[in-house]
């Protein structure tokens, strides 16, 4: 018998139903009952990781402490569980096939024909069980990306079938998330899509134990009974997931539906103490009952797709709760600031954030946003590329360094105030080759961020190839832009500030990756506080 219990979350009918949020919510409830839980995501695409994917394709690329470029759902896992994830928490088909092919090239299979079954499914099983066997979690929740019926998801569903047989059915649970659409014309909720989705899962040899039904209308007893009867699921295992105003309500809704109790019962596990969700409820109360609103502009080039900035948006929600306010985010496409007067578009903002990104598109607009914030003394935060834009803007408009820029966009700039890192110069591959993961930073004792953190040594996550060119450090500091955060090992400038302004900060790292419900990030808390006082 396995000591670790395994919970598999699959999806049907349509994508983007919220498997990640349901997984994170269940994990939160089980964690609050005293169990040691983690979540992993199995992604069916053949990319090794989302690091080379355009945000329009896949949304944000989330980075873990150990430097893995992963799916944005891992951000939800961390924000809900308040625990870091790792390389092992995100598995892609590309990574699975790469591992199997490498083994084949080494001769590990002793001349056998390498096939999807058993070799690919064995590799998937190894990666699922690793978290339980090596890292000793009580429960591993495995979210399978895509929807049942997708060709690319078939090896994962087959792996679930095999694992359930091997582990014993008392050691695993399958939760299937589907949609019950409401037809306004007839005023009916329709269960047929769910029935077809479960039938598809059954054809692949997997019987779901629990059904979670996404719906915009309350599901009555009769609907639940009908779904349970036609899908071979007990009625108490038919769980309603109704639309809510914020994802942070979902754990409480799942607690009302007794999802955690149903799971524990099916796994023959002890029902420990009642979950203590008081801090979560307090946070949610503040989110829903904020006394004021602050308007902050988020300047980027992927603003049509908010998921491209998912962690930043969630960080503002966390920081808003601390400051008893709602952060109204004005998504501003940086290219629009190149086509119209920036002052017309940016007027009325109480804070400006220039977002991370890559490439030259929209760069002039980001520089204009920095200039507006600096000249109007509006609280400003630049993240990664946003920090680099602050350095370039200062070089051009304050230091009068004509043509100052980053060698990422302009290789032959006469003043490369932002330049490629030395260790990156010989690298040609794009995937997984940046400076990734957590690095230390030492803060100046008089800086705004030292006050925000309450300490002088921090560790933050990175994802970049270019950095501040220290050849220009002295003239920048003499003119008023201070390097207030330095990597103690490399001398890399991690933070710049303009102390004479109200709140003007640029950071080379990504603070948004570490903000959680129970530990809002101090940079965002301080930034929102400054924006609130802007009035």
Image: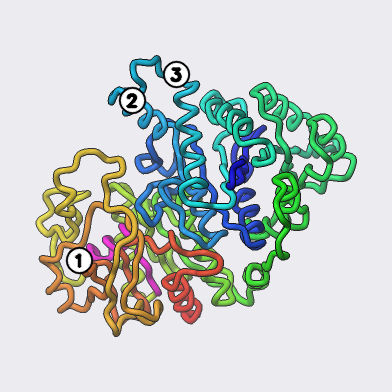
Q: CA distance from mark 2 to mark 3?
A: 14 Å
Which picture quadrant has residue 220? top right
Q: Residues within 10 Å of mark 2 (few under 14, many from 20)?
A: few
* Nearest to the observer: residue 350 or residue 204: 204
Q: Residue at x 53, y 26 (%)?
A: 155
Q: Quadrant of residue 461?
A: bottom left
The quadrant the N terminus occupies is top right
* Residue underneath mark 3: 115
Q: Which residue is mark 1?
A: 489
Secondary structure mostly seen in the magenta stretch: helix
Q: Where in the figure is residue 470, as x and y percent of width and height? A: 14, 66
Q: Position of residue 508 (x, y in %)?
A: 30, 62
Q: Earlier in the sequence, mark 1 or mark 3?
A: 3
Q: Which mark is residue 108?
A: 2
Could one spot residue 447 in this view of the protein?
yes
Q: Nearer the viewer, mark 2 or mark 1?
A: 2
* Residue range corresponding to the magenta coloring: 379-394
Q: At 41% from the left edge and 67% from the top edge, which residue is drawn?
A: 352
* Magenta-colored stretch includes residue 391: yes
Q: Is residue 182 magenta?
A: no
């Amino acid at each position: 018998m396995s000591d670790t219990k395994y919970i598999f979350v699959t999806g049907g009918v349509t994508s983007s139903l919220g498997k990640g949020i349901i997984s994170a919510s269940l994990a939160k409830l089980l964690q609050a009952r005293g169990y040691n839980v983690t979540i992993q995501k199995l992604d069916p695409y053949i990319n090794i990781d989302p690091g080379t994917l355009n945000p329009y394709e896949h949304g944000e690329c989330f980075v873990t402490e150990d430097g893995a470029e992963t799916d944005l759902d891992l951000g939800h896992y961390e924000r809900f569980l308040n625990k870091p994830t790792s390389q092992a928490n995100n598995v892609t088909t590309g990574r699975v096939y790469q591992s199997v092919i490498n083994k084949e090239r080494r001769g590990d299979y002793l001349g056998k024909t390498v096939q999807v079954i058993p070799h690919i499914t064995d590799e998937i099983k190894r990666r699922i069980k690793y978290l339980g066997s090596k890292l000793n979690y009580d429960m591993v929740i495995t979210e399978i990306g895509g929807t049942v019926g997708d060709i690319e998801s078939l090896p994962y569903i087959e792996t679930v079938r095999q694992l359930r047989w091997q582990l014993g059915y008392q050691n695993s649970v399958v939760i299937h998330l589907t949609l019950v659409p409401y037809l306004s014309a007839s005023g009916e909720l329709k269960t047929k899509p769910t029935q077809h989705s479960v039938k598809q899962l059954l054809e692949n040899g997997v019987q779901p134990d629990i059904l979670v039904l996404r719906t915009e209308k309350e599901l009555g007893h009769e609907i639940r009974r009908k779904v349970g009867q036609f899908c071979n699921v007990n009625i108490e295992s038919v769980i309603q997931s109704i639309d809510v105003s914020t994802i942070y309500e979902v754990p409480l809704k799942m607690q009302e539906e007794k999802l955690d109790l149903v799971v524990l019962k099916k796994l023959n596990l002890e029902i420990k103490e009642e979950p203590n969700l008081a801090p979560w409820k307090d946070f949610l109360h503040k989110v829903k009952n904020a006394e004021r609103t602050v308007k902050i502009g988020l300047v980027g080039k992927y603003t049509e797709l908010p998921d491209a900035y998912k962690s930043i948006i969630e960080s503002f929600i966390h920081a808003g709760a601390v400051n008893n306010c709602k952060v109204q985010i004005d998504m501003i496409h940086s290219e629009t600031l190149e086509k119209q007067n920036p002052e017309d578009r940016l007027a009325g903002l109480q804070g400006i954030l220039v977002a991370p990104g890559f490439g030259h598109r929209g760069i002039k607009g980001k520089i204009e946003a920095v200039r507006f914030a600096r000249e109007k003394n509006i609280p400003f935060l630049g993240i990664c590329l946003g920090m680099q834009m602050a350095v370039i803007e200062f070089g051009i408009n304050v230091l009068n360094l004509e043509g100052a820029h980053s060698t990422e966009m302009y290789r032959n700039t006469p003043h490369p105030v932002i330049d490629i890192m030395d260790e990156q110069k010989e690298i040609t591959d794009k995937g997984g080759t940046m400076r990734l993961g957590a690095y230390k930073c030492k803060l100046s004792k008089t800086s705004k961020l030292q006050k925000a953190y309450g300490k002088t040594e921090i560790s933050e996550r990175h994802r970049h190839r270019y950095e501040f060119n220290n050849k220009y450090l002295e003239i920048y500091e003499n003119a008023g832009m201070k390097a207030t955060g330095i990597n103690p090992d490399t001398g890399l400038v991690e933070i710049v500030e303009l102390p004479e302004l109200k709140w003007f900060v640029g950071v080379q790292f990504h603070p948004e990756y570490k903000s959680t419900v129970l530990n809002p990030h101090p940079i965002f808390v301080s930034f929102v506080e400054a924006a609130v006082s802007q009035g």
